Amino acid sequence: MPGLTDFGPNAQPPSATIASGLIPKLTLLVAMSERGNLSAAADAAGVPQPTASRWLAALSRMVGVPLTRRAGQRVELTAAGRALAESVRTAHSVMAVGVARAYEAADPGQGQVLFGFLRTLGVSRAPELLRGYRLAHPRVRLTLVQAAHEQLVAALHDGTVDVALSVVRATDSEVVAVEMFKEPYVLVMPAGHRLARHEFVRLHECRDESFVGLSRGIAMRRSVDDLFLAARVRPRYVFETEEVETVRGLATAGVGVAVLPARHGGPLSGSAEVPIAPRAYRHIGLLTSRRRTLEPAAEGFRRWAMRHSTNGLSSAPLALNMPARR
């Protein structure tokens, strides 16, 4: 009916209609600033010269100031026209970068991956994984984030990390975890310690020892505390620190014994690592967020990592629902 506006599913809002009409006119304006005359600009924009003249006049009316002027037989841009053309050129450059990024995102062989991992995995596990991936996919840009588990989960959800290598917890909301390997908890001590040659050790056997360990509040410390609680042992800590490798070094030096995940690559020189009984493990997996869909490059990295895990990856990994205790 006359006088009615079509608001159906295929109708464009007025702003979209205006924008659609503006884009070719602005492209013509940029061509004018680059070529210096109307005829060449019209050829570059792919329109007849009379159409180009009408477009520039219409654009001047929309902006509200003259964008062109007559100079003898020629048409040239005014200062306002040159200023607008420069702004359009800047916007065009930004759009070109966006299109390039879109092509990158569509190609798993390039693009960018934001990979997060626990600090305790930064000594060997994560570097080993990254070295192999880098050799296979040299065009993919990798941005690395080291953080505590809770920070990695938050980053997965907000998009500042695509894939994380961290502990597997059933308590993490909307996280998909695929187990990669598991690390047994061990008692770390000097090689000459009385328990160093045991096949395994029960925590009540070392209840009178002095301990070194991680500071309270660190997730791994809470896991170790759970082991002591289950064994009904109250450890006596003589040193507490925030770095796992510092704890391992103190235990190797004989300052105290420590309960830690086994060191990848074997005990430090001069130390012994004896498994805790009953056996307990820290489960490490690849984590992603259910709230986000991975870009092709990140999804490609996730699949590659599952196939080329550093140790202990099953041939058909499954999303896990592990118990809260690690």
Image (spheres, rainbow, N blue to C red):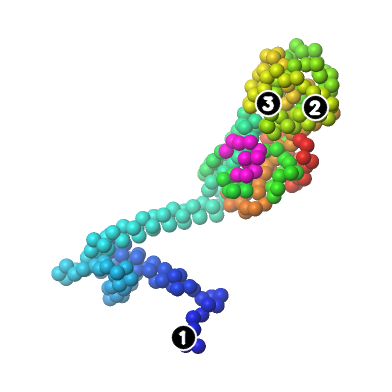
> x and y percent of residue 324 in the render?
77, 40
Cα separation between marks 2 and 3: 14 Å
Q: Is residue 116 left or right of residue 54?
A: right
Element type at marker 3?
strand
Marks 1 and 3 in Cβ contact (< 8 Å): no
Q: Depth check: 309 or 98 in front?
A: 98
Q: Quadrant of the C terminus?
A: top right
Quadrant of res 207:
top right
* Residue identified by numbered label 1: 3
Which numbered dot is residue 228?
Answer: 2
Task: Identify the mark nearer the N-term, 2 or 1.
Answer: 1
Residue 317 visible in image: no
Element type at marker 1?
loop
| Magenta residues, dominant SS class | helix
Cα separation between marks 1 and 3: 75 Å
Element type at marker 2?
helix
Residue at x 29%, y 66% (from the top left corner): 41
* Kind of residue at disc 3: Leu
Residue at x 57%, y 45% (from the top left corner): 160
Q: Depth check: 317 or 3 in front?
A: 3
Which numbered dot is residue 214?
Answer: 3
Marks 2 and 1 in Cβ contact (< 8 Å): no
Q: Which residues are magenta?
A: 145-155
Residue at x 29%, y 75% (from the top left corner): 54
Q: Is residue 278 left or right of residue 67?
A: right
Residue neighbourhood size for the residue with mark 1, other residues' Cα within 10 Å, grouped as few (<14), some (14–19), many (≥20): few
In this view, which residue lies farthest toward the bottom? Answer: 1
